[in-house]
Amino acid sequence: MRSDNPIQYSIVVPFFNEQENIPPLYLKLTEVMDAIGESYEMIFIDDGSRDNTYRVLEDIYEHDRRVNLVRLRRNFGQTAALKAGFDYCRGDVIISMDGDLQHDPAEIPQFLEKIEEGYDLVSGWRVARKDRWLTRRLPSKVANWMMAKLSGISVHDFGTTFKAYRREIIQEIHLYGELHRFIPALAGSNGARIAEVPIVNLERKSGKSNYGIGRTIRVFLDLLIIKFMLDYSTRPLQLFGLVGVAGTGLGGIICVALALEKLIFHTALFTEHGPLLLLAVALIVSGIQFISMGLLGEMISRTYYESQNKPIYALREVKSHRKEMGDSAETRPSGGGSPER
C-alpha cells in the first residue's frame, strides 16, 4: 500500500501505570516496523498515570523523532485514550495495541497483510487466552457471543485493542464511554469490510492489570446501548412503539374480556378479578407511555440529524460524470463520505 502521504503507518498505544513495560515494547515495535520498511510514527498516550510512565515516554521521545506523546490531564479510560491517539494520527493505516506487553508487535505484519487484501478493519483474535477463566475468559466469551449475535458481525473477539484500521474508517466513528471494544460493530454498521487474525495472548510480565469483574458487568450494559445505536437510533418508535402497542393491546384484551364477563354474568370485578383488572390498567398506561417515548425519541432523533446535517449513511466512493459535463456543484454530502471520483 503506497500513497502520497509521507506517513504510512501510525502505531497507537495507550499507557496507564506501565513504566516497566514501555522500554521493551518500544524496542520490539521499532524492530518490527523498521523491518517492514515503510514510513511510520508512534503515538504514545499517557492516560493520567501515577507512576513514572510519562518520564519514561519523555526519554524515548527525546531520542526518537518518530515518537509523539499525548498526555491526558487525568485517567479518562481506554476509550478516551485511544480516541486521543486516533485524532492525532497521520498515517494511512492505524494500528492500536495495549501497552502491557500482552500484544506481540511481531504479529503486526499479518494485520497489514489483511489490510493490503482490501479489508478496512482487521481485529485480533485471542484464540488461547491466558487470563483467569471465571473473571475474564467466561464473561468475555459470553459477551463476544452476544455482541456477534446482536450486531450480525462474525467476530470472535470484540474486546481486544490489537487492531488495524484504515484511517478513514476509524475517524468516522465517534468514540465515548467504553465503546472502543465495540468498534467492529460500529464500523460494520457503516459498511466496513472486517477480517480477523489469530494472535497470541501473552502473559503480563510486570505491572498490575486494570481490568476486573466490575468492567465485565459494564460490558453487558454497553451491549444494550450498542444494540439500540445499531438498530434503532434513527427509528426509536420501532422499538418503544412495538412494546407500547403490545402492552396496550394486551391490556385492552383483558379489559374487554372482563367487561363481557361483567355484562353477561354480572361478576363483581373488583372482588373476583381485582389484581387482573389492575394489571390491565397498568399495561394500558405503560403501553401509552412507551408509545409516547417512541414519539419523543423520533422527534429528538430528527432534531439531532437535521441540526447537524448528519448523514444517515456512509459512502465508500462516488463516481460521476458531472465534472465532465461542466457541473461544478459539490456532490459530497456534508458530514462524511468519500471524495467524488
Image (tube, helix red, strand yellow):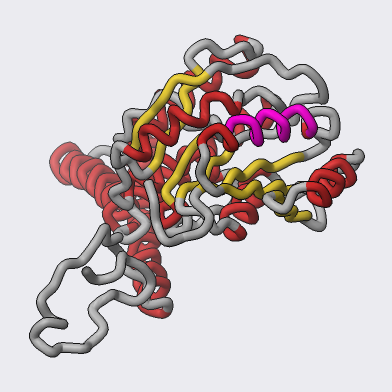
Would you identify the image quadrant in which residue 70 lies? bottom right
Left or right: where 303 falls relative to 35: left
Q: Image point 41% across, 57% down: which residue?
A: 168
In front: 194, or 260?
194
Magenta stretch encompasses residue 79: no
Relative to residue 273, is residue 258 drawn left or right? left
Residue drawn where x is 40% and y is 61% of the image: 293
Q: Is residue 163 visible?
A: yes
- Placement of the C terminus among the 4 image quadrants: bottom left
Give the image location of residue 47, x and y in percent.
Answer: 76, 47
Depth order, front residue of 49/210: 49
- Quadrant for residue 303, please give it: bottom left
Q: Residue shown at 46%/53% (left/top)?
A: 92
Q: Which residues are magenta?
A: 23-32
Can residue 248 be spotted in the picture? no
Image x and y of residue 244, in percent: 31, 51
Residue 29, magenta (yes or no): yes
Residue 14 location in percent, x, y?
69, 42
Q: Residue at x 37, y 77 (%)?
A: 309
User: Horizontally, is 169 left or right of 159 in the view?
Assistant: left
In the displayed structure, 281 sits above or below 25; it is below
Query: Residue 213: x and y, percent?
Result: 67, 24
Total numbered labels placed on residues in the image: 0
Q: Nearer the viewer, residue 255 or 329?
A: 329
Q: Assign the magenta stretch its main secondary structure.
A: helix
